Image: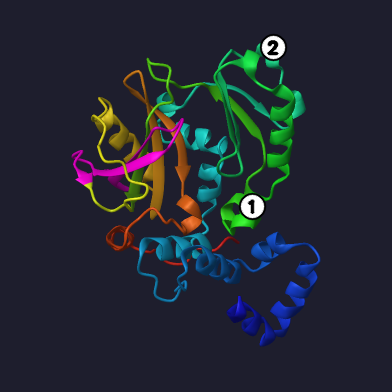
Amino acid sequence: MFAIKRYLKENDVLRSACSQAKQMGFDTLLYILPVLASKYRYRKVTGQKLDLKNPRNFNEKLQWLKLYWQNPLVVKCADKYGVREYAKDCGCEEILNQLYRVYEHPSEIDWGNLPDKFALKCTHGCGFNIICDDKKKLDKEQTLKQLNEWLKTRYGRQTAEIHYTYIRPRIVCEQYIETDAGLLPIDYKFFCFNGKPELVVVCSDRSSDVRFICANLDWQPMDILTKQCSSEKLPNKPDCLDAMIEYAAKLAQPFPFVRVDFYDFKGKPVLGELTFTPAACMSLYYNETGLQLLGDMLQLPRTYCRG
């Protein structure tokens, strides 16, 4: 924080802008000064100084991409609704989850026309999800209140993830996905570098204590996660693993990095989302070996700024 204050003291233009932003809250600082805000948040979360001139590890390179590779296609694909059109354009329409409705406002939701189980997701951020496994037990008043709060949240400003600020806030309602045992399915997160899937992080026990384990594409475990969050056992390989890899490669083609998430639904892959800034590019999940290994895989492109 002292570094930011010192830098602002030496720059009249930025100091004037921040003086105006001060009246509007810290989220505005994140919007107009994303580089400084990213450096501040990075040090606060990781305890490390963010090196954007010579980024080396995975988190640092993702921060660089976030700030200096602003391809509009990232905005479209980070949008929980816009990504559907992109998947269709890539010839991957068959992996899209069934869409019930898209809402501009929570008041548009007609509960009577929805099935007993469904998922509600806001399009412009992460974690804005309501998973309903029994409509009769759902607190609809609280759900509407929560959705209203999320739609008003300037997620991209709060997290300094610039691309989210360009996404139109909406709500999508999709099919509820579950296993034969009635549990939430395993989440398979494929890390793709320069259009090529290289590894997968398997997220299990999603209804309780979420655990992660990393595997290569031959389904052998990789020791790149911290002990605190890592699962001890790799689940059985999904029957549709090869299909997931194939689809991930198609969807990842234009991007230096993207994480492509799938569910295994009755033996077939279902697209979850495309993520470009996992954990806001400040993940504490990886050990030092993992941060460096993933960083080495990510070859940074030339700068691409929005016009």
Residue 142, image x, y percentages: 72, 29
Q: How busy is the neighbourhood of tag 1: few (under 14 within 10 Å), some, or many (20 plus)?
A: some
- Compared with residue 297, is residue 251 higher up or lower down, i.e. above or below? above
Identity of the residue drawn at 42% across and 56% down: 284
* Horizontal side of residue 73 vs 22, given as left or right: left
Which amino acid, mark 1?
A: Thr
Q: Which residues are magenta?
A: 195-221
Viewer-closest of 228 and 87: 228
Quadrant of the rendered image containing residue 184? top left
Viewer-closest of 277 and 40: 40
Identity of the residue drawn at 75% across and 25% down: 141
Viewer-closest of 12 and 69: 12
Query: Which residue, given by chain and number where applicable, does mark 1 sit on?
Result: 165
Quadrant of the rendered image containing residue 159? bottom right
The quarter of the image holding the C terminus is: bottom right
- Compared with residue 114, is residue 284 higher up or lower down, i.e. above or below? below
Which amino acid, mark 2?
A: Gly
Residue 172, image x, y percentages: 61, 29
Residue 94, image x, y percentages: 41, 24
Q: Is residue 219 magenta?
A: yes
Viewer-closest of 199 and 25: 25
Identity of the residue drawn at 71% across and 22% down: 140
Secondary structure under the numbered disc 1 in the rendered image? helix
Q: Is residue 277 visible?
A: no
Indicate which label's residue lies in the foreground, 2 or 1: 2
**What numbered label is drawn on residue 112?**
2
* Horizontal side of residue 218 vs 129, given as left or right: left
- Compared with residue 299, is residue 111 higher up or lower down, i.e. above or below? above
